Every structure is written in C-alpha cells, then in structure tokens.
Image (cartoon, rainbow, N blue to C red):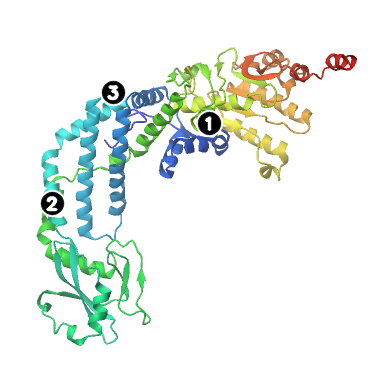
Amino acid sequence: MNDFSLLHPQNSTEKYNQLTKEAVNDLSIDFLCDAITDDAYERNSIKQLLTSITDDKDVIKYRCDVFDDFMQYPQLRADLIDLLEKLNDIREIERFQKDSEASSLWQLINRLREIDGYVDCITRIKTTLESIDVKSEGLLNLKNNVQNIFNGSGFPELKQDITEALSKVQKLKSITLGVNLDSLLRPSTVGVVSLNDKEFTDSGILKKFMRFANNDSELHNGNDVSGYVHFHPANPMTGKLGFGQMVIGAQNDVNQIYNSEATGADPLSDALKKVVTDILRRTVNEIKSILHKYINVNGYSLVALMPEIVFYVRFAEFCDKIKEKGLPLCKAQVVDREQRNCNIKDIYNIKLGVKAVEGDNSEIVTNDFEFDEDKRIYILTGPNRGGKTTITQAVGLAFLLAQSGIYVPANSMEFSPCDNIFTHFPADENDTVDLGRLGEESKRLSEIFKSATRYSLILLNESLATTNVAEGLYIAKDVVKSMRYLGVRSIFNTHMHDLARNLEDVNNSVEGDSRIESMVTGVDHGNRSFKIYISSPEGVSYAKDIAEKYGVTFEQIKREIDSK
C-alpha cells in the first residue's frame, strides 16, 4: 500500500501546480477551510490539498468518483472518522520511534503498539468496505488491498502474539525506589527496590516523611533489601517520576521540581531502564522474536491516508449541510482539457452557501455560465454591488472544487480542467507604496502572463481601476488582447464600460481562438437582479433605471413641481 492514494490512481503520472498566494486570498480559501472544520491540523491538510491543482482528466475523474462514494455512504464517513483516532495514535508512535534517545525497551513496546494499531485499522477498514457497495476505483482498490493484507499476513496469529506479548509487559504497574540521603537529606544514590504488578496508591508520602523525620522511633532500622537493590550514583540531572521531574542530587544546594516530556533518555530513567531491561530480559527477547516474524508489517502507509480521509469526509459533511438548505450541488463531469470549454447550470458562490449554513436567510440567485469557442473571455460590467465579484469568484471556486473531486455549487457542470487559476484583485494599499497602484497592478499582471498557458483560468476583478481612467483603459485593452492571443479562459469584471465596446474590432485585430464577449449583471426596474447575460455594456441605462426608481428624472421632477 506504499504507493496507494485516494487522490490519484496507482502508477499515475499526475503533475500539480500550486495556487499563488494572491489566488488563495482572492478565492477566500481560508474562509472556506474555516467553515469546513474547526481543527487546525485538518484545516491545514485540506488547504494543502485544495490549493494543489492537477488538470489530469483521469485523476480528476478518480477523485470525483471517490468523493461520490463518500457522499452516498454516511456510514463510510462515520467509520473512517472513528478510524482517524487510531491512525493518529500510529502517527504519534512513528514520531516517538524517530527519537534516537528513546530506550530500546520502549521502542520494542511501541513497535508492538504500532502493529496492534495497524491490525485494528486494517480490520476496521475491511469490515466497513465489505458492508457497503462502493463504486469508485479508489475505494474498490483500498478494499482489495486491505483484504489481501488481512488474508495474507496471518492476522489472527499476529493479534494473538501481540496480545500475549503486551500482557507480559503490561503486568508492570509500578516501581519501588530506594533513595539514600546524605546528612543534608539530599539524595545521594537511588536504585530499584522492586517491580510491582499493582499501582502505587498511597498519597501520604510527604506526611509520612515529616512524621518519620520528627520521630526517631519511626525510622526503619537498617536496610534489609540491600541484597537485591541495583544502585546508581546520584546525578544533578532530572528524571521523570510520573508527576513531573525531580532533580536527583544537589544543584547549587537547591532541590527543584520541573514538568517535562521525558522519553527515557535522562539519567534516572536510564537507570530504571537498565534495571527493568535486566529483570525483563526474557520478555524483551520474546518481544524481539515476535517482531522479527512481522518485520514487514508497517502501519505508516495507512497514516499517509489520514489527510486524504479528512479531506473527503469533512467536505462531504459540509456538502450535506449545504444540501439541507435546499441549495443545489452536483458531481462535475470532466472532458478533455484541449476543448477549454465549460458549461455550468445554476452556479452560485459557495461562500453564499457557507453563510446560509451559518444562518443567513438571504436569497441566493443562481446563474448559467459557459465557456466555449465563441466566448472564452468575458468583459463583465454592471452596477456596484451587482454581483460582478461574486460570480467571478464563483467560477474560480467551481473549477477548484471540481478538479479536487468535490461536488460543485450548481445543478450541473461539464468542464475542461484548467492547469492553474490566476487572480488579479485589488491590492492592499500597503503593497502599492513603492510602485504606486498602477505600477503594482501592472507588475502583477506581467507575472501572471509569465506563468499562464492557454489552459489557464484568469480572473480579474476591477483591475487597473486607477483614478486616471485613460491610463487604466489603455493598459486594460492590451491585457485583453494578450489573453486572446494566449488563448486563456477569463472573466474581467470592470467599471470601464469602454473596454467592453467594439469588441468585434478587437477580436478581428488579434489572432487567437479565445473570443472576447461582453457580459453584464442585470438591473430590473432599478433593482439589482444579480443575473448575468451576454449583452453590450449598459452604460447610462443603469443610471436611468435608478433615476426612475427614485423619481429623479427631469420628467418626474417636473410633474412633481407642476402638481404643487
């Protein structure tokens, strides 16, 4: 299972491109991850997977099918979530095993714990996958792998061996120490008096010590256990005693208590380890013998699946919440990237879905959206707060989710994958000090064109909207021509209505197969409809609608005056 993944087929040659930090910010990836899980480790895992983009059709289909199974079978999700805790235990053991200072006995015991956890995980996954009718290649391969491991690794015998070995080790419940004191009552030597099969429960240590120190008759006369105590020299270092760390020996004439995460490498624990190892030598040898038989049993390949399981499970839980709100979600259908097409029915911004889940009852307007050979670059105009940024971001997030295998916020989506998503949204004012806003925006656009290909998706939001409209428009026209020449898919939402005029002249002036089209966000009787449609820029038509709505056209005002 070393090369097995739920994110791509075995022996695939997938390649990934990383979203830029600007795209991560502009697409609100952190906002989305925060909505999916509260756990920091899970958020980080989801973000890393979500922002690594592949345009491999087979990989995307593989992911879509796996996620479809996660959506169809809630029991699969529930069982795998329970499994994550066990996998996390194996991960922690792996980290401990890498500690070169950990005692050999503890390494043996933790190796037993690792194998025991691995056996439990394989058994759980096998039981779960055999109880449901999974369809995806990924989960069918996982099912086949765990069945082969279970049937071919002698699991019943392995489980019995582990249980017997651990039971011998786990008989040790407490250690009785003997500590010699000098004339100032400082520990001078320490040794193990006995190994016990019961836990120490007496909590009156300090009280008894003070009573002993103040009453000579209470002091034990002599030492009748010296024949079998293994003494070790006092050392002004530290040793873990279960409740913290106690300094053994004098250090600047001060005895101190510390908290610690000791792993057995300090002097006291080393002393105890040697004694325990000596006494349990036969058990240690038996453990080694058992481990030798299962030298190739390794649970770390399962640990590698943890981020992938988290990714699918948390997104599936989130999608269930979206569906409960009555919003559409669908499994995207991927086609060859060479087509550079996209057809989405009833798309909406997934961020609005997040707000709906959180209790926002605002109406969500859906739209149809399409890229094809007649229209691959849109100049999107319309009123302020009319939904231009929302739909621009919605398209980018739909591509990102679809290529990750996740259901998209729409009724249907058929698309050619992009190799990366580049965004150009307004920059923070603090980032424009050195170059000025126009210079900074021009620099970022130049960097995008250095990386983008004809398979890229470029989203521009109010780009080049400087105070000097003429300068911004001049550069914007060249940017649009460059996108047509390169052949990308793009949405350029802007208030520069002149950019969307006479587009046929622009299409004819530059060779390329990404045709430029004008799109607007609608206004219905002065109200923003948030619907998009292909049309020439409305220009003053929106102002006219607003004026009529609020009664400030000349005719309306004149009638009002004349009626007085």
Residue type (three-letter) at the residue carrying disc 2: Ala
Q: Is residue 549 left or right of residue 419?
A: right
Residue 165: which disc?
A: 2
Residue 477: which disc?
A: none
Question: x%, y% of residue 7?
Answer: 37, 31
The answer to whether residue 548 of the structure is visible from this angle is yes
Q: Please state, as top left, top right, bottom left or bottom right, where the C terminus lies in the image.
A: top right
Determine whether the residue tagged by mark 2 lies in a helix, strand or loop: helix
Up-down: is 7 above or below 564? below
Q: Earlier in the sequence, mark 2 or mark 3?
A: 3
Question: x%, y% of residue 320?
Answer: 41, 27
List the residue tagged with mark 3: 134
Residue that appears at 32% across and 31% down: 77
Marks 1 and 2 in Cβ contact (< 8 Å):
no
The answer to whether residue 181 of the structure is visible from this angle is no
Residue 355: which disc?
A: 1
Question: x%, y% of residue 12?
Answer: 35, 28
Residue type (three-letter) at the residue carrying disc 3: Val
Using the numbered discs, state the Cα–Cα distance from disc 3 to disc 1 in whole angstroms: 32 Å
Residue nearest the viewer, comparing 105 with 12: 105
Using the numbered discs, state the Cα–Cα distance from disc 2 to disc 3 in whole angstroms: 37 Å
Residue type (three-letter) at the residue carrying disc 1: Lys
